[in-house]
Amino acid sequence: MNVSRRAGSALLATALGLGLATGCGDAADQTLPLTGLVLPSASVPAGYQVVPVPVDDLLSANRQTLEQATTVAFSPPVCKPTADAEFSPQLNTDNTVLLVAESDTATLSEVITTVRRDLDADRRATTGPCRVVTVVPTKGTLAGAQIVTSRREISVPHSDEVEQAVVVRSDTVTTLVDGQYRVRSALLGSALVRRPNGATVTVSVNVATRDLSARPEAPTQIAPPMDEDEYLTLFDEAIARAAR
């Protein structure tokens, strides 16, 4: 984004290769490269502008995120994310493409990769006892802050091409050491999508607000970065495009 700043998540980012394979018919569809599976710029919601972000930036942000996770205390402890540790190190410039678009208040990112993501681990880390998780960093600029994230699983897409999917609304309130508050909201979806050539790709779409300026009072309500129905329509389109 700087991947970590723009999309706020090392998992989800996107903005390379919007080129499409030419030709028509099933044979052409089955040979589409990964760069032909990402959302076209015309599908980016109004108010968002596609920005160029190299895959290498995503990989760098992933490494930083995994390193930072080792210095963070999670409560409950069982809610520490595990899917990233297995998934992120396998990404590279040959097996991953991405798209990033920014508005004045939020960042939209899409990742498509041939690396299979453990969506069961994602669900375990965001539902049940992990619906509300408190994180306390021990290093960095947020050391000592209390970060409380509340998650709610929302409707997942159903189609013959979708092997499995997870979609979550995530709202985060950070209480800084000086007593001020920062708020952030995100809509995050990942799906394992089957292609006609028999391959399976992981498709992730993330829309996240940027951290707002610190405020003296805790928020009573948090606005999402995008209407949930609009997000689900976009996610459905991303899945349909990846299933070619």
Image (cartoon, rainbow, N blue to C red):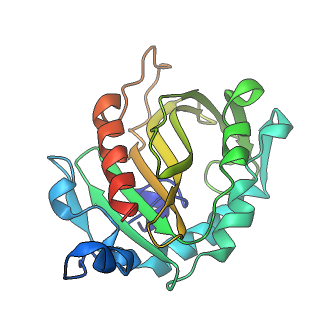
**Residue located at (37% from left, 30% from top):** 224
Q: Nearer the viewer, residue 88 or 28?
A: 28
Taking the view exactly as shown, the residue that stands out farthest to the bottom is 94
Taking the view exactly as shown, the residue that stands out farthest to the front is 26
Query: Is 49 on the left or on the right of 5, as rendered?
Result: left
Query: Is 174 on the left or on the right of 234, as rendered?
Result: right
Taking the view exactly as shown, the residue that stands out farthest to the top is 220
Query: Is 26 on the left or on the right of 12, as rendered?
Result: left
Position of residue 181 relative to residue 73, above or below, is above
Q: Nearer the viewer, residue 4 or 119?
A: 119
Q: Position of residue 185 (x, y in %)?
A: 45, 35
**Residue located at (59% from left, 75% from top):** 91
Q: Position of residue 171 (x, y in %)?
A: 51, 31
Q: Position of residue 175 (x, y in %)?
A: 59, 31
Residue 67 in sight from this viewpoint = no
Position of residue 185 relative to residue 37, above or below, is above
How many labels, in total? 0
Q: Quadrant of the C terminus?
A: bottom left
Q: Quadrant of the N terminus?
A: bottom left
Position of residue 26 relative to residue 164, above or below, is below
Q: Position of residue 61 (x, y in %)?
A: 55, 69
Quadrant housing residue 68: bottom right
Residue 228 in sight from this viewpoint = yes
**Residue located at (38% from left, 57% from top):** 109
Quadrant housing residue 83: bottom right
Taking the view exactly as shown, the residue that stands out farthest to the right is 77
Q: Nearer the viewer, residue 210 or 54?
A: 54
**Residue located at (37% from left, 46% from top):** 235
